[in-house]
């Protein structure tokens, strides 16, 4: 089968079976073209919750599928590739967080959305990369324990200097592949390009950005800007998506090594097999776990 034939069959089957296909923006172009929604993890889960599809296929990584299940407990949620995890989400175990909370009494525990459902059961508030500053500003406590990404945490701290933060040494190994030398070399090669970076990058790298924001924030900035050249400092799939969205503009990677291998685990044929019902993994969570984990998400929604 050709790519187009596989895509047509996926589209036919998902309509026939009332399936919603979600694709994180780091998915490859061929998968994004058959998805009902493309975007950041939490936004995708919200879109799935609004729809009437009985089955949801998450083309992303495990914590994203778990978040989707938390927001749509009555739906069947399928992770397109069972091996697609998130190294950052798996950096802290629940018992480690419990110990951290004892070390920092009186702190509000804030978790990045890029965490396991198990970890969220021990957190007070959840945030996304785009909402973190606003949400934490609205928390009625000046002491914040932020997990697991200390790089995103450093960015938030710089925006809210009046609050006291405690961090752990965690982060996204994909974004941490971008070095200051990478940025300097890319800027030398494309001196007129604006640098758009994700706050999961190391603070020394993030400091070189003309714009710092979430994946969808980066894409929106590039699409709306009158500028014509951009250096993209996040997962390199975004470059291709922007090339399709803005063919009159030029996009270059800050680093050729900024590639998430977990996102690459899902292929177009995996999606076909999922809609056929022969592949993927159904996400199952106990009612108790979902209730406890949902509290920090509900608190995020209340604050933001």
Image: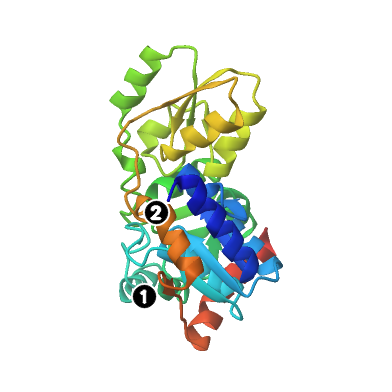
Measured as percent of width and height from the top left, residue 240 is found at: 48, 34
Where residue 137 sits: x, y (%)? 61, 53
Q: Is residue 284 left or right of residue 45?
A: left
Residue in view at x 46 percent, y 48 percent? 27
The image's mark for residue 267 is: 2
Mark 1 neighbour class, 10 Å CA radius: few under 14, some 14 to 19, many 20 or more: few
Q: Residue at x 54, y 59 (%)?
A: 10
Q: Nearer the viewer, mark 1 or mark 2?
A: 2
> Total label count?
2
Q: CA distance from mark 1 to mark 2?
A: 37 Å
83 or 213, which lies in front? Answer: 83
Query: In the figure, residue 21 lies in which quadrant?
Result: bottom right
Closest to the observer: 73 or 221? 73
- Label 1 or label 2, whichever comes before in sequence order: 1
Where is the C terminus found, in terms of image quarters?
A: bottom right
Circle 1 sits in a helix, a strand or a loop, which is it?
helix
Is residue 302 something one can see in this rendering?
yes
Judge the density around disc 2: few (<14), some (14-19), many (≥20) Cα neighbours within 10 Å.
some
Q: Is residue 159 above or below residue 112?
A: above
Quarter assignment of residue 80:
bottom left
Residue 66 place in picture, x, y as percent? 48, 70
Horizontally, residue 140 falls left or right of residue 116, namely right
User: Disc 2 on helix, strand or loop?
Assistant: loop
Going 58% across and 75% down the picture, which residue do you hit?
A: 295
Dot 1 and dot 2 residues touching (CB under 8 Å) = no
Residue to which mark 1 is pinned: 98
Residue 57's tag is none
Does 27 appear above or below 73?
above
Q: Residue at x 48, y 59 (%)?
A: 144
- Is residue 189 or residue 240 the one in the foreground? 240
Residue 47 location, x and y as percent? Answer: 65, 61
Depicted 195 relative to depicted 58: above or below: above
């Amino acid at each position: 089968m050709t790519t187009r034939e596989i895509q047509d069959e996926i589209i036919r089957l998902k309509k026939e079976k009332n399936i919603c296909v979600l694709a994180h923006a780091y998915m490859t172009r061929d998968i994004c073209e058959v998805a009902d929604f493309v975007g950041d993890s939490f936004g995708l889960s919200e879109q799935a919750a609004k729809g009437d599809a009985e089955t949801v296929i998450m083309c992303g990584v495990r914590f994203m599928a778990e978040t989707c299940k938390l927001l749509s407990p009555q739906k069947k949620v399928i992770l397109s590739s069972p091996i697609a995890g998130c190294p950052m989400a798996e950096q802290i175990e629940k018992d480690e967080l419990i110990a951290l909370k004892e070390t920092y009494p009186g702190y509000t525990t804030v978790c990045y959305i890029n965490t396991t459902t198990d970890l969220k059961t021990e957190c007070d508030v959840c945030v996304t990369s785009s909402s973190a500053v606003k949400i934490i500003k609205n928390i009625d406590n000046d002491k914040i324990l932020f997990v697991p990404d200390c790089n995103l945490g450093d960015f938030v701290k710089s925006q809210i200097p009046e609050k006291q933060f405690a961090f752990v040494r965690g982060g996204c190994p994909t974004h941490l592949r971008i070095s200051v030398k990478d940025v300097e070399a890319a800027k030398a090669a494309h001196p007129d390009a604006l640098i758009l970076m994700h706050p999961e990058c190391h603070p020394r790298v993030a400091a070189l950005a003309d714009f710092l924001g979430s994946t969808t924030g980066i894409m929106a900035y590039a699409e709306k800007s009158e500028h014509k050249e951009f250096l993209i400092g996040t997962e390199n799939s975004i470059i291709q998506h922007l090339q399709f969205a803005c063919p009159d503009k030029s996009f270059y990677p800050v680093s050729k090594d900024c590639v998430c291998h977990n996102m690459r685990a899902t292929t177009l044929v995996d999606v076909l097999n999922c809609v056929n019902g022969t592949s993927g993994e159904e996400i199952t969570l106990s009612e108790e776990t979902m209730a406890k984990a949902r509290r920090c998400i509900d608190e995020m929604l209340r604050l933001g």
